[in-house]
Image (spheres, rainbow, N blue to C red):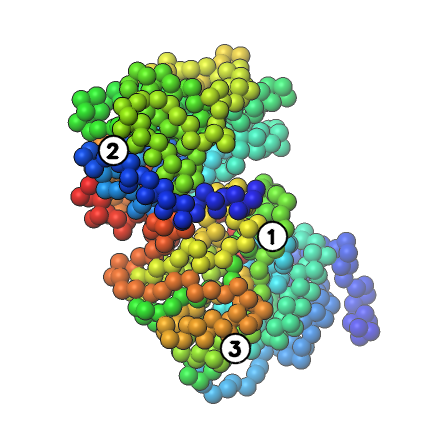
């Protein structure tokens, strides 16, 4: 820190200061922001080399790579913020291939006038999430846009990971007879975020489920390496996920409404807002498809992990050239679970 | 709100018992054609698969009780004119954004072209927007049956008290009992060519206007009405009550939804509505044509807040797509699957007819939840 202080006459004002165009200009102000905030928080040797890229050795085998943009409003919500979400979201996208995430990259678009105190809070949250997950943020980029041309802060994260030998997970691999497993309750994230919207705000104990799932995934693929499909039900909720898999695999899916866990507060909030939890976003749940003979073993390992405590077998894959997702309702009837059709739900991830 | 409370009204065991009751009560020697007027009921019926639990001779016909579905094109055109030509901040409910107007233009498309259109959850939000933007004209495009009318009345009386000069309402509030009367006046129903034996009466609407609002109708048209809540077990219970009435030859107004609806309704809300609104001589309903005394307008005392008087709005009328069967579907003469456009070029993402727009519309509910049953029901 002494060195930093010597280099810049005054440290960043992380209490009252605001982002200005100078922080994105490539000049001294930007260098100071990177050093005093990003490097200090993310704190890892690859980042500290200050190259325009991170350099690391490659392992033999298959690698995965993914990228995701985060534009959530509000930035801070019960159970997380845009920073932790940006880390969890990308780690999960890597993990859904059955892969072990190795490194993250982070691009930030900041709006002129954005409070440095908020930025510090977000960056600290990202650093904490990355550290907890054991996946360092090794390179990044910062841009500043004029006031009115961004919504405070947009974050993009990119992740790479390696797939263990013998694991081959893909959205097109669901087969008739496969069991469909869900790692826990749905709708927590979306309703937690909505509860803090200015136009809606309601008092609730609902907390976002935002979490990094790679630990759970590692245990799952260790016990059942032959998992066919794995995906996390984020935007569009469980309904979108099931429809995507049905189309990609050319199969139908039947789920039982009574088997899908929804916590009471989420159910209540959805009733009030006229939402269906099936369409509400999650950030710490996953859905896996496996051969029927593997289902109980997979359920057992999921249930034994803290992030899969409420895991359940919610349905099965059937033959259906129309790729319909159907649901047996709690009432005893049946219905289609369709894609979300143009609902005006605001940004939640 | 306790969730256990909600679940009780969706319980599979109770549903099974009610289903057996309905099967036992339904006379196999006849058919029962029951219309649920409200889109809320249509939605619940499809979402929970209620039809699966009914005998083949009990058929549900989906009525016109979906506010955006019955809004005629000239009114949609007014909304588009207000937003695109008059430079106002146009506030409305989310359902309204995708309703196709002339040339399939929608508010959503107008918004993408720069019109200032805001989705609100309540008319009072529009009022707040007007207060926050004193230099802009703010118009609330009001749609809905008697359920959404009292909040609009409250907002208008507040606007008057606050002496706001930049807030107005484009009123499209419509009335349920005249619409049911109008439905039965159509040729096919009058002649009995398309039977309508009884009605599942609206839930929230009845909470406002009271069950007695349907008594003149039941008496005059000799049709039973059972007011029902929006939970699937409410719907099933009301079906059983309607079947019993029909078996007994009764045509009464019964109330299944006593936990919310009284005979008198919400007298305070009625008074509030009466202070702000008066009944229009006639109003055009999509699919039903001009219905006398079927809608509300702002009273003279509120003229300053009436967007129809405040802005010069043109009457643009464009005929519906000829192949679109929405008018017949809204009147219960056809089912969505009878329409050539259904699920081919008319989908919830690209609605041609109004029944596909709102999740409460018969076509959208059928498309979203019921496509698997097309063949099964075709035979009924």
Asked whether, in this view, residue B341 is left or right of residue A280, the answer is: left
Res A32 label: none
Q: Numbered disc 3: what chain?
A: A
- Examine the image and state in which quarter residue A128 appears: bottom right
Residue neighbourhood size for the residue with mark 2, other residues' Cα within 10 Å, grouped as few (<14), some (14–19), many (≥20) = many
Residue neighbourhood size for the residue with mark 1, other residues' Cα within 10 Å, grouped as few (<14), some (14–19), many (≥20) = many
Residue at mark 3 shares a chain with residue at mark 1: yes
Question: How many angstroms separate mark 3 from mark 2 (CA)?
Answer: 56 Å
| x, y percent for residue A79 | 63, 58
State whether residue B269 is above or below residue B115: above
Res A219 label: 3
Res B32 label: 2
Question: How many angstroms separate mark 3 from mark 1 (CA)?
Answer: 28 Å
Q: Which residue is mark 1?
A: A206
- Examine the image and state in which quarter residue A103 appears: bottom right
- Examine the image and state in which quarter residue B108 appears: top left
State whether residue B206 is above or below residue A231: above
Closer to the N terminus: mark 3 or mark 1? 1
Identify the residue at image location x=56%, y=25%: B155
Identify the residue at image location x=25%, y=33%: B32
Asked whether, in this view, residue A202 is left or right of residue A297, the answer is: right
Q: Numbered disc 2: what chain?
A: B
Give whichever of B229, B186 is nearer the camera.
Answer: B229
Tell me the quarter of the image containing the N terminus of chain A.
bottom right
């Amino acid at each position: 820190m002494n060195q930093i202080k010597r280099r810049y006459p005054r440290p960043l004002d992380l209490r009252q200061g605001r982002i200005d165009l100078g922080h994105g200009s490539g000049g001294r102000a930007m260098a100071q922001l990177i050093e005093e905030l990003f490097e200090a928080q993310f704190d890892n040797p690859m980042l500290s080399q200050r190259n325009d890229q991170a350099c690391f050795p490659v392992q033999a085998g298959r690698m995965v790579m993914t990228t995701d943009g985060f534009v959530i409003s509000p930035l801070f919500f019960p159970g997380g913020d845009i920073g932790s979400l940006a880390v969890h979201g990308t780690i999960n996208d890597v993990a859904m291939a059955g892969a072990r995430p190795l490194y993250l990259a982070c691009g930030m678009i900041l709006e002129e006038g954005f409070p440095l105190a908020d930025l510090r809070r977000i960056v600290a949250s990202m650093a904490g999430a990355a550290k907890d997950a054991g996946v360092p943020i090794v390179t990044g980029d910062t841009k500043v846009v004029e006031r009115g041309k961004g919504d405070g802060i947009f974050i993009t994260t990119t992740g790479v990971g390696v797939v263990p030998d013998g694991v081959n997970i893909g959205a097109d691999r669901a087969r008739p007879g496969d069991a469909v497993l869900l790692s826990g309750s749905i709708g927590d994230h979306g309703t937690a975020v909505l509860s803090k919207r200015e136009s809606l705000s309601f008092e609730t104990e609902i907390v976002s489920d935002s979490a990094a799932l790679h630990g759970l995934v590692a245990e799952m693929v260790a016990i059942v390496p032959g998992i066919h499909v794995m995906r996390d039900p984020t935007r569009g909720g469980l309904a979108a996920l099931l429809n995507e898999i049905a189309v990609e695999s050319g199969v139908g899916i039947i789920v039982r409404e009574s088997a899908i866990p929804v916590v009471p507060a989420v159910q209540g909030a959805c009733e009030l807002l006229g939402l269906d939890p099936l369409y509400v976003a999650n950030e710490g749940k996953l859905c896996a498809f496996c051969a029927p003979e593997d289902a109980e073993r997979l359920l057992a390992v999921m249930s034994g992990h803290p992030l899969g405590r409420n895991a359940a077998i919610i349905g099965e894959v059937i033959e259906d050239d129309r790729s319909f997702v159907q649901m047996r309702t709690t009432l005893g009837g049946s219905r289609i679970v369709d894609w979300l059709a143009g609902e005006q739900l605001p940004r939640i991830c | 709100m306790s969730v256990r409370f909600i679940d009780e009204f969706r319980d599979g065991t109770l549903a099974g018992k009610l289903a057996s009751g309905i099967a036992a009560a339904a006379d196999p020697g006849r058919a029962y054609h029951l219309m649920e007027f409200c889109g809320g009921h249509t939605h619940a019926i499809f979402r929970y698969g209620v039809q699966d639990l009914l005998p083949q001779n009990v058929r549900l016909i989906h009525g016109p009780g979906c506010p955006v579905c019955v809004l005629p094109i000239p009114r949609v055109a007014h909304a588009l004119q207000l937003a695109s030509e008059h430079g106002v901040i146009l506030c409305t409910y989310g359902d309204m954004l995708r309703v196709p107007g002339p040339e399939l233009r929608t508010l959503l498309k107008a918004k993408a072209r720069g019109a200032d259109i805001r989705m609100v959850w309540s008319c009072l939000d529009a009022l707040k927007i007007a207060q926050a933007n004193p230099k802009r004209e703010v118009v609330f495009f009001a749609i809905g049956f008697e359920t959404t009318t009292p909040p609009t009345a409250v907002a208008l009386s507040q606007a008057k008290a606050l002496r706001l000069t930049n807030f107005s309402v484009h009123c499209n509030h419509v009335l349920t009992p005249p619409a049911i009367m109008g439905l039965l006046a159509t040729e096919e129903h009058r002649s009995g060519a398309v039977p309508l034996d009884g009605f599942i009466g609206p839930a929230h609407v009845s909470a406002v206007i009271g069950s007695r609002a349907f008594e003149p109708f039941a008496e005059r048209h000799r049709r039973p009405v059972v007011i029902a809540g929006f939970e699937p077990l409410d719907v099933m219970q009301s079906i059983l009550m309607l079947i019993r009435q029909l078996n007994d030859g009764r045509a009464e107004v019964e109330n299944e939804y006593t936990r919310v609806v009284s005979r008198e309704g919400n007298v305070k809300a009625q008074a509030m509505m009466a202070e702000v609104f008066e009944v229009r001589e006639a109003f055009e309903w999509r699919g039903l044509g001009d219905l006398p005394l079927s809608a509300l307008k702002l009273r003279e005392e509120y003229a300053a807040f009436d967007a129809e008087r405040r802005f010069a709005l043109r009457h643009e009328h464009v005929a519906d797509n000829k192949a679109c069967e929405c008018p017949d579907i809204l009147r219960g003469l056809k089912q969505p699957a009878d329409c050539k456009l259904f699920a081919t070029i008319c989908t919830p993402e690209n609605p041609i007819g109004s029944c596909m727009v709102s999740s409460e519309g018969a076509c959208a509910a059928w498309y979203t939840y019921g496509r698997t049953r097309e063949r099964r029901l075709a035979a009924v």
